[in-house]
Amino acid sequence: MTRPVNVLFLCTGNSARSILSEALLNDLGRNEDGSPRFLAWSAGSKPSGQPHPEGLAELKKQGHVTSLYRSKSWDEFSQSGAPEFDIVVTVCDNAAAEVCPVFFGPGLKVHWPQADPAHVEPLSARQAAFARTYEICKARVEALLALSETELRDPAAVQAIADIEA
C-alpha cells in the first residue's frame, strides 16, 4: 500500500482559501474504499487565528464538517514529526500585492493564485465571493485528483491547475 499524497495549502492568514482547499481535498481525495488517497493541511505565515466565518459557512452549506479546521502557523510543519509534503500550494493573490509565503521544506512547489474573499464588502457580496472561491477551489482540487501518479510529480502538470477558474 502506498501512502497518501500529502499536500500543504499555504496563504498568509490561513483563514479562507487555504482552509477551503484543505477541506475539499480531505473530503474528495479518498479512494473507493474510503481510505485517503490525499491528505491535506493548511497554514499561514501570519495566521489570523481563526477561520473566516463566511468560509466556514460556505463549507457547512456545501456539506463539509467544519470543526476539523483551524487557522495555524506554518511553524507547526517545521517541527519534528510533521508530515513530509509531496506538494506545497500557495494560494495568495499576486495581483492584489499579497505577499506569498515561501516554504523551504521538501515537496513540489506550485502557485495557484486566487483573490481573497475575506475583505469583500458588503456582506452579500462577501458571501457571493466565498461561494465563487469555493467553486474555484473545488475545480482545482478535482483537477489535482484527476492527475496520474506520474503527473503528480510533474511541476508543469500541477502548476497548470492554476489556470482553472471553475
Image (tube, rainbow, N blue to C red):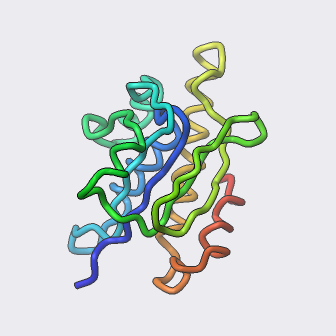
Q: Which percent across, then down, holds residue 80?
A: 26, 55
Looking at the image, which is closer to me, 60 or 66?
66
Q: Which percent across, then down, holds residue 157?
A: 63, 75
Left or right for 108, reference 100: left
Q: Which percent across, then down, holds residue 123?
A: 58, 15
Q: Residue furthest top?
A: 122
- Where residue 130 sits, quadrant-wise, is top right
Q: Which percent across, then down, holds residue 76?
A: 33, 45
Give the residue at x 69% y 35%: 98
Left or right for 3, reference 59: left
Give the residue at x 25% y 35%: 67
Vertical comparison of 158 with 7: above or below: below
**Total number of numbered discs in the rendering:** 0
Give the residue at x 37% y 70%: 5
Give the residue at x 61% y 39%: 132
Looking at the image, which is closer to me, 65 or 76?
76
Left or right for 82, reference 138: left
Vertical comparison of 58 with 36: above or below: above
Q: Residue furthest right?
A: 95
In the rendered image, the quadrant that contains the N terminus is bottom left
- Where residue 114 sits, quadrant-wise, is top right
Vertical comparison of 17 with 39: above or below: above
Vertical comparison of 47 with 134: above or below: above
